[in-house]
Amino acid sequence: MIDLTDRVIQPSFPREPTPFRAANGNLKWHLPRRILQLLCGALLIALPLTNGLRLDLRRDEFYFAWHKMAGHDLFLLFWVAMLGVALLSAVSFLYGRLWCGWVCPQTLASDFADSLRKRLDKAFRARPGQKSFYVARTVWVLGILGMSLGTGIILACYWLSPQTVGAAALAPWRDIPAGLTIYLTGGLIAGDMLWLRRKFCHRACPYGPLISTLTDSNSLAVRFLTERADECISCHKCEVDCPMEIDIKTGVGQHGCIGCGECVDSCNDVLGRRGIAGLIEYRYGTEPERVTKTLTWAERWGLWDGRRLAIAATVPISLGIVLFLIYGTLPLSANLTANGAIERSGTQVRNTYSLTVGNGSPNTTRFALSALGLPSGRVEPNFVIVPGHANRTLPVMLLSTQAAPGRTPVSFRLTAPRESKDLATIFYAPPTKK
Ligand code: SF4
Ligand code: SF4
């Protein structure tokens, strides 16, 4: 068992709790959690708007880490998805429900809706049945609707360019698929924030059942210290302050517990005033307490057995593959097939081919095209531009005014600043009519 909390009452405590410190001097979790939630919210907004992450379905573009790639690069998409799975699995295995309470956008939305409602009720001194109550709730609903539409616009920017989304938000009848994406997403978010909120975490979120397969009894969890249960004064503050309406005293790992740590702060405040260490903590494991000072840094970060090290290692491995696919250079690939179109016009003969070029570099590249082995051979077009990590297929023509009748072995040469490739084929010149 690893105890994350400094259980010693500091000499200058107990004293009145502050937003940063509980009455027993322990750091409060509420403020760091709020700061992390706000940073995650800001990242969620910034990523699609700054081309940090977007799979643009209309332009066939994939933006990842502010790098533009082809949208149909399924190999890269697969490894980006694998990175997400590795990250979520590692966070879940090491830190249990911390994702839910500290990072998940659903919790952020529910916290925002609940907090806004409480603040408006207070500001309008709302009492059920009074006019002020209806005014406060109307302002709340309007605020949620505005926030939901804004979120719908941001989420649509993960699939469409911000310009397309902006235009569709203002005139949805001009671009019905984009307009529907924005307003339906916004409507679902409004329904979630106005009615569902925590019910979604309790009853609908698939991550809840999944987490039970991803954690073991030694994963980090908020725990009531049953060995000191007799010190509980039954004030119920931990239950009152719990956003999920859970009584953590009835057991660890309850389905609805999102690991937010609000009950840890509550108990530290209540018992801290009496000079007693709190009875609720973030803790790895359920065994009797170990002394915090003996822990290594790896153990404090949850890396204290082989399985955890192995699952954590999948994150840098997946990240390395994704970075290589984005920034690394793969060889140029190309394929040429004659499509059978052969024309003679006077002395000039024209053969048409289908050329596919795979650009393995991360940058858009201009490849020069030339012909080898054909007298007065000329290629049209004589260059092809291919985006980074993308394929492009186009028709190309080989023309000659001096080709001997019959089959002539020739080559197309693709030349880029750093590499070139020759593609062997046949040029056919039909006999001239007498
Ligand atoms: S029991 Fe504690 S950690 Fe779990 S949701 Fe409630 S307040 Fe958060
Ligand atoms: S806040 Fe602490 S003392 Fe109060 S009921 Fe909860 S566990 Fe017991």
Image (spheres, grey):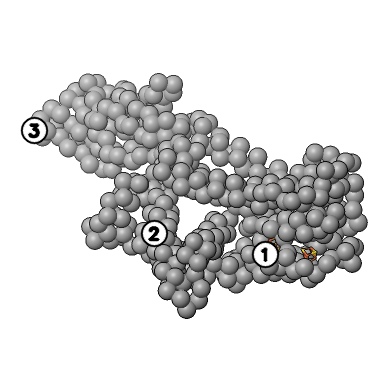
Q: Residue at x 85, y 53 (%)?
A: 275
The residue wearing badge 1 is: 242
Where disc 1 sits, the SS reads loop
* Front position among marks 3 and 1: 1
- Whether 183 is drawn above or below 12: the answer is below
SS at mark 3 in the image: loop
Quick check: 292 above or below 348?
below
Question: Against 345, is 135 above or below?
Answer: below
Labels 2 and 1: the sequence-earlier one: 2
Cα separation, mark 2 vs mark 1, equals 27 Å
Nearer to the camera, 220 or 364: 220
Observer-nearest residue: 330 or 396?
A: 330
The answer to whether residue 255 of the structure is visible from this angle is: no
Image quarter of the C terminus: top left
Q: Residue at x 54, y 67 (%)?
A: 197
Q: Amino acid at mark 3?
A: Lys
Residue corresponding to mark 2: 146
Give the quadrant of ligand 1: bottom right
The count of marks equals 3
Quadrant location of residue 355? top left
- For the residue marked with disc 1, what is the amino acid? Cys
| Alpha carbon separation for disc pair 3 and 1 | 96 Å
